[in-house]
Amino acid sequence: MADPVLQIEDLGVRFHLKRGRLTAVDQVSLTVNRSETFGLVGESGSGKTVTARAVMRLVPIPPGEIFQGRVLFDGENVLDKSDAEMRELRGRKIAMVFQEPMSALNPVFTVGNQISDALRTNLGMSKREAKERVIELLNLVGIPSPESRYGNYVHEFSGGMRQRVMLAMALSCNPSFLIADEPTTALDVTIQATILELIQSMTERFHMSLIFITHNLGVVAHTCDTIGVMYASHLVELGTKNEIFANPLHPYTQGLLNSIPRLDTQAKFLTPIKGLVCNMLEPPQGCKFNPRCEHAMDICSQEVPPLKEVAPGHFVACHLHP
Amino acid sequence: MSDYFLEVKNLTKHFPLNNDLISRLGGKTRTLKAVDDISFFIKPGETLGLVGESGCGKSTTARLITRLIEPSSGSIYLKDDDLLSLPPERMLDVRKTVQLVFQDPYSSLNPRKTIMQILSRPLEVHNLAKGWTAKRRHVLHLLRLVGLGVEHADRYPHEFSGGQRQRIAIARALAVSPQLIIGDEPVSALDVSIQAQILNLFRELQQEFNLTYLFIAHDLSVIRHISDRVAVMYVGKIVETGTVETIFENPKHPYTHALLMAVPHADPLKPPPRLTLQGELATPVDPPPGCRLYGRCPIATDICGEVSPELIGRGGEHYVACHNI
Ligand SMILES: Nc1ncnc2c1ncn2[C@@H]1O[C@H](COP(=O)(O)OP(=O)(O)OP(=O)(O)O)[C@@H](O)[C@H]1O
Ligand SMILES: Nc1ncnc2c1ncn2[C@@H]1O[C@H](COP(=O)(O)OP(=O)(O)OP(=O)(O)O)[C@@H](O)[C@H]1O
Ligand code: SF4
Ligand code: SF4
Ligand SMILES: [Mg+2]
Ligand SMILES: [Mg+2]
């Protein structure tokens, strides 16, 4: 039975900038069930991180504004919660691994002390307990010689190691919901395989739900149950992993799958999606993908296609599939 | 004249770790061997792909070649110039010849400067465009090259998403018409549709200007796509190098095997990624003698724990560092 933990309903987030109003997330609705892994993929700048930050209530306001929608976590709207309630929720239930590890880790404290401080504040551990737990966590995420790395600063870690420190920090309070924003982007594949295995075993062991934001379709193909595809602030396709890979319907999803470099042959040039990234300050009318779409019709530049269920559990927002 | 555009010989970078508790208690300094006696070359107009475990020393190698940090020992030749004994006045030229595109687009762009200012800076430093109009024209051209538009020129880095910022970093490297571009994970932060454009862009620019690339990536499908030859690194050492076909179709080193098995295919019907190596990650901090893969390697023998294997030629341009191949 579906047991929804997170329900995002008609979410809209925009930024008020000097140069105008930028709608970063528009009419996004999605549900993540208990123990489910939801993969969020899509164009860079399409609003994946902002969607995740809205769930964590970490959108900077101002310039940001959550102008519509609800974010229900265990049935309660996080957008109505007080700051104190939110801090409690973030410390104990929802954790996020950020895309930019450098901005989430403090350069002036040692990595060990940062994680152990979080443990002592959120879980009330003693200094010694916290230190032992941190070393255990660093070991768990594959940091070699964790005892001697405990006292290192962030800048003494490589990019990949910083990501693993972030994961250790996120897992430190045993959250029931994890948002991982590009957690393996800077990692090579053997470490990625371990981290993916680690995240998967955590989700199974603790019935943890997960939103996995990534641009690596290989990663999504082997970790996620459900996939949502975003383009220019909209969720344009949603379905089970197998359905999305076997039967992609949105022209952007199709283009995405076609532009992956292959491992078994070497082509001189790839088949990218043509065109520029969408200018989010002056997005095109109608379907935001229309200037890049090979199937664009008259209606595409006039009306935004709504997300419609075209097969059981398979949703797509495209005028080709009315 | 050297046949190589870049040649690196016995390059080594050791970081003393003075800060950590264990060395302070024990009163001795521990050494982090980030890059340990590596040698490789890149021919003009060629792309060498550099792959390897997180923390194995790829970025350190890039930073050594661009002289952002000083090596502990070894030499770096750019064509016939010995970079480590070059007089300071020639270094500005070298800085123009060799450009680095960083791994982390968040920290490499000055948050207080507009994109126009960021991209004008190298033009000013190297005297490439005089006057506001010429600079602006050049900058707009660079933005187009990397798939951005006029409307982006007067915005600040924080207003861009991760992928857009990496495009700006690439535009900045291209600004001075370099000959060697070192890309340190330059496409890792990009989504696939844009990654394909940027990889095509790297190709087009290479053909047009006969550029030489050192391309660092952890995504093996990207390495496969972009490289002519590949070097595989593990904990400060190069363990295997060869043509892209050899590395992907006939890999010999156990670590290269492991890498290829661990790649997630973008196809849920293909087998999931698997890790064929056992045990703990090797550490670059005071590593024990012998092969760095010893302890994790499925085919290790006694000698592997005692003697570090040399990179030995196996015919053609294929080199493998392993006692049991
Ligand atoms: N603090 C901010 N101020 C102004 N604009 C912002 C801010 N944060 C995000 N944006 C804008 O909101 C849009 C969505 O950004 P977001 O970071 O969610 O993209 P993303 O899908 O995570 O992209 P990527 O894959 O590149 O990380 C972008 O156009 C971005 O420029
Ligand atoms: N300034 C420094 N002081 C101490 N150690 C350092 C310093 N810079 C790098 N290191 C260490 O050197 C090793 C190699 O780091 P490097 O950044 O070159 O790795 P990398 O191969 O680029 O990894 P990644 O794929 O994660 O980016 C790591 O163990 C790192 O912690
Ligand atoms: S709605 Fe039109 S422009 Fe948009 S993806 Fe569908 S066919 Fe293309
Ligand atoms: S030298 Fe020994 S330990 Fe190292 S890769 Fe070869 S067999 Fe394995
Ligand atoms: Mg993001
Ligand atoms: Mg690096």
Image (spheres, rainbow, N blue to C red):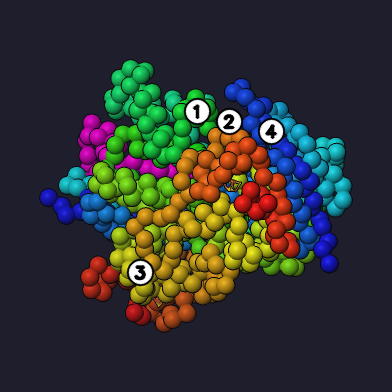
- Which numbered marker is on residue B241? none
Between marks 1 and 3, how big is the CA–CA gap? 43 Å
Closest to the camera, between mark 1 and mark 3, is 1
Q: Mark 4 touching mark 3, by CB under 8 A? A: no
Q: Nearer the viewer, residue B216 or A285?
A: A285
Residue A14's label in the rendered image is 4
Q: Position of residue A285 (x, y in %)?
A: 61, 35
- For mark 1, give the secondary structure: helix
Residues at marks 4 and 1, common chain?
no
Which of the two residues, A173 or A218, is positioned nearer the viewer here?
Answer: A218
Label 4 is placed on what type of residue? Answer: Arg
Q: In the image as oriented, which residue stretches furthest toward the right?
A: A75
Percent from the top left, x then y, of residue B39?
A: 29, 59
Q: Which residue is mark 2?
A: A282
Is residue B93 part of the magenta span, yes or no? yes
Q: What crowding class fits label 4: few (fewer than 14 Cα within 10 Å), some (14-19), or many (20 or more)? A: many
- Disc 2 marks a residue whose amino acid type is Glu
| Distance (Cα) linking label 4 and label 1 | 19 Å
Q: Which residue lies at the image location 48% right of the left edge and 34% below the top edge? A: B109
- Residue at 48 percent across and 49 percent down: it is A273
Q: CA distance from mark 4 to mark 3?
A: 47 Å
Could you tell me which secondary element the residue under label 4 belongs to? strand
Determine whether label 1 and label 2 are within 8 Å by CB: yes
Q: Which residue matches tag 3? A: B247
Q: Earlier in the sequence, mark 4 or mark 2?
A: 4
| Residue marked by disc 1 | B151
Instruction: For residue A16, say whether it is visible.
Output: yes
Residues at marks 2 and 3 touching, judged by CB atoms closer than 8 Å: no
Which one is in front in this view, the residue at disc 4 or the one at disc 3? 4
The magenta segment is B82-105
